[in-house]
Amino acid sequence: MMALFALALLCSSPRLAQDPAELCNPMLFFGPEPDTFDLSAFIDRELAWRPGYWRRALDNSRLYWPMISRKVRETGLPQELVWLPLIESAFESDAISRKGALGIWQFVPSTAKAEGLVVNMWVDERLDPVKSTDAALRHLRSLYAIFGDWNLALAAYNAGSGRVWFAMYQASVGGKKKRRVPRKAREMWIKSGDVWDFWDAQGYFPKETRRYVPLFYAALAAVERAGEFGVNLADTLAYPFASDTVFVDYPTDLALVSELLGVPLDSVVLRNPELALGLTPPDTLWPLRVPPGRAQGLDSLLRTIEPRDVTVWISYKAQRGDNLWKLAKRYGTTPEHLAEVNGLSLKKKLRLYQRLRIPKKVKARSKRDEIYMGARP
């Protein structure tokens, strides 16, 4: 059986491209399976092992794949990248990993910010499928510009460029597998590396990355066999949804907006996915998106509701010099209360980067008394 196994340019370009803008349109091609890995068997085994996962992921994709496909086509990247969220998040916009990666493209905060996304306690654009797709395609394009090979670009998307460089270097020199990546991994690879293929170096990647690239091809096979999972990928919705905008000057709860308009909560949340708390941010005139024809009515209704005190619970990492007294003064609470809610002793020093829960009082239009980070309505 022949299987998709490699992504490559059908035009000449250097292995290490200098400028992403110079790339010609990359395309997929069919080729023989890698000699060192039985890709066909992996695909068949993977699809048979988790049919429920693939059914759910394919079903979720119907909301987003047309939008992603348009953006991929506009950027000239391979259309197959449309389906990368199948293995990243099962196309769940609020999916979160153990390492804090979030959204359908599973960005960690540092990479998200590097790609221009806003990430803070109020607004997290990793949750916005449109903006995070733009960021993901920029990131994938830059990774391809670095490696000149889509399998390696996918590996770098999962593990980071440094791990890819070092895995390729170790495969070239036959070195022992190491977890720690040296700072000069790229230079080491370029200087002495003669392995330029993911499959030849597969055993030197972290365990997750060894499966990640083959899993992408399993995802492509799942798309081809979507009917076998009972999913009609042609049955799609027009996302992003048509909306009107109303500007709000106080933090406003999406659950309250849903109630005032008499519309399902999902119809409001899906139009404002970047609001991490389900609450518009303070100290700004925020453009709140609502179903068409509802903006004027909502504006009038909100003017009749007085903002009230709401406690927002913040997840905070202790920084150098922090203590409970300083944090209590900064957030308008008491050291005793912070110690109690975090199970700490007033006598014990905070560890650097220790995770704390901190209450913050805000004036908001909401019926909720307390709002927790990561708990949208």
Image (cartoon, rainbow, N blue to C red):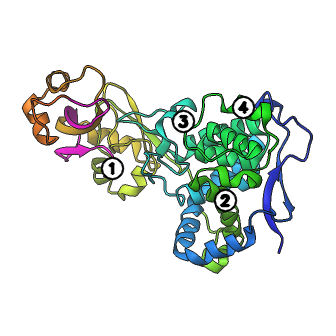
Residue behind mark 3: 111
Alpha carbon distance from label 3 to label 2: 21 Å
| Residue at the spot of label 1 | 376
* Side of 106 where 250 appears, left or right: left
The picture places residue 262, in percent across and down from the top left corner, at 32, 56
Residue 86 percent coordinates (x, y): 59, 60
Determine the CA span between mark 3 and mark 4.
24 Å
| Residue labelled with disc 2 | 216
Label 3 Cα crowd, 10 Å radius (few <14 / some 14-19 / many 20+): some
**Mark 3 or mark 4, earlier in chain:** 3
The span picked out in magenta is: 350-377
Foreground disc of the pair 1, 2: 2
Residue highlighted by disc 4: 188
Closer to us: 316 or 207: 207
Depicted 96 relative to depicted 348: above or below: below
Question: How far apart are labels 3 and 1 at the CA level?
Answer: 23 Å
Q: Secondary structure at mark 3?
A: helix
Q: Which of pointers 3 and 4 indicates the residue nearer the eye?
A: 4
Return the disc, 1 or 2, that comes first in the chain's sequence: 2
Residue 34, horizontal then vertical, whole percent: 80, 62
